[in-house]
Image (cartoon, grey):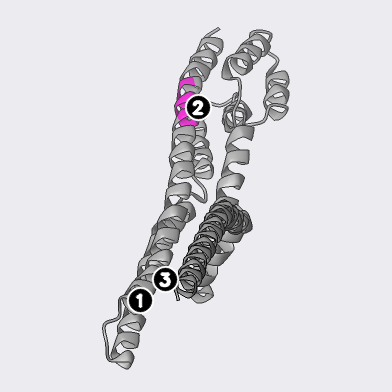
Amino acid sequence: MKKLVTILAVAGFLTFGLNNVVKAQDAATNATSEQTQVANDENAAPAEATEAENAIGLEEEVVVEKPFHQVLKDKFIEGGPGWMTPILIILILGLALVIERIIYLNLSTTNTDTLLKGIEDALAKNDVEGAKELCRNTRGPVASVFYQGLDRYNEGIEEIEKAVVSYGSVQTARLESNMSWIGFCIAVAPSLGFLGTVVGMVQAFDEIESAGDISPTIVAGGMKVALITTVTGLIVAIILQIFYSYLISKIDSLVTSMENATINYMDIIVANKRK
């Protein structure tokens, strides 16, 4: 009986010990697995972060800025070709007139001191035809005015002065030619822009009425499209206004130079007439 109890006690002890050992091994195995999983998760996290960063980088690389001419084209379409086209035509017409005036005024610039010196030397020798030839070969309104005076050199001083003053007025009017049309383009461009804006606003309110709801998207989109025409018109007007101001200053400079040269010219004529 004692042997049986002893055997059962030993068997129970061994069974309990084996269970503890097995549980300990299982616990160790589970701990190792958990550590491995954590390590794998930690390794996977940077990899996922790297993939996410790469994906963001790819998206950023895909976003490419549009060239300037493409932006202008998009804005032209958004503003509506029906309203943007007239403003574009006004810009082209205005720039064409500006270029024509710049070329004409630059060709009208004359070295009056050299011209007056040549006329004075020719008249001092009584070579009226030589003075006329010098005026014919010199470009610009000043030379044309002087030629008209020399053409009446054999007449009285008053007749010469009348011819110079009259033809000087004609040349001044030629210098100011087409300036009124440039001013017209400056005035019309923003007016067309404002008109397009008003019409666009009316269309935006019509869309709001049709939708039956004041949606920020509808309001913002309609106002954006409407204001593009105004912005374009103002830009065109500003560009043309800058050139217009330059042309006005150039004309004033030429007229002032012409008046001063004419005064000196008449002094030369009077001095030679009195000899």
Q: How many angstroms separate mark 2 from mark 1 (CA)?
A: 61 Å
Q: How many angstroms separate mark 1 from mark 3 (CA)?
A: 12 Å
Magenta segment boundaries in residue numbering: 253-260
In percent of width and height, residue 63 lies at 59, 58
Residue 217 is labelled as 1
Q: Nearer the viewer, mark 1 or mark 3?
A: 1
Position of the N terminus, as image quadrant, is bottom left
**Which residue shows up at 52% across the image and 10% down it?**
271
The amino acid pointed to by label 1 is Thr
In percent of width and height, residue 12 lies at 47, 70
* Residue 211 shown left or right of residue 126 in the figure: left
Residue under label 2, please give it. Answer: 258
As drawn, 64 above or below 219: above
In percent of width and height, residue 108 lies at 60, 33
Residue 225 is labelled as 3
User: Magenta stretch: dominant SS?
Assistant: helix
- The picture quadrant where one finds residue 197 is bottom left
Q: Nearer the viewer, mark 2 or mark 1?
A: 1
| Residue situated in front as seen by the camera: 236 or 20 | 20
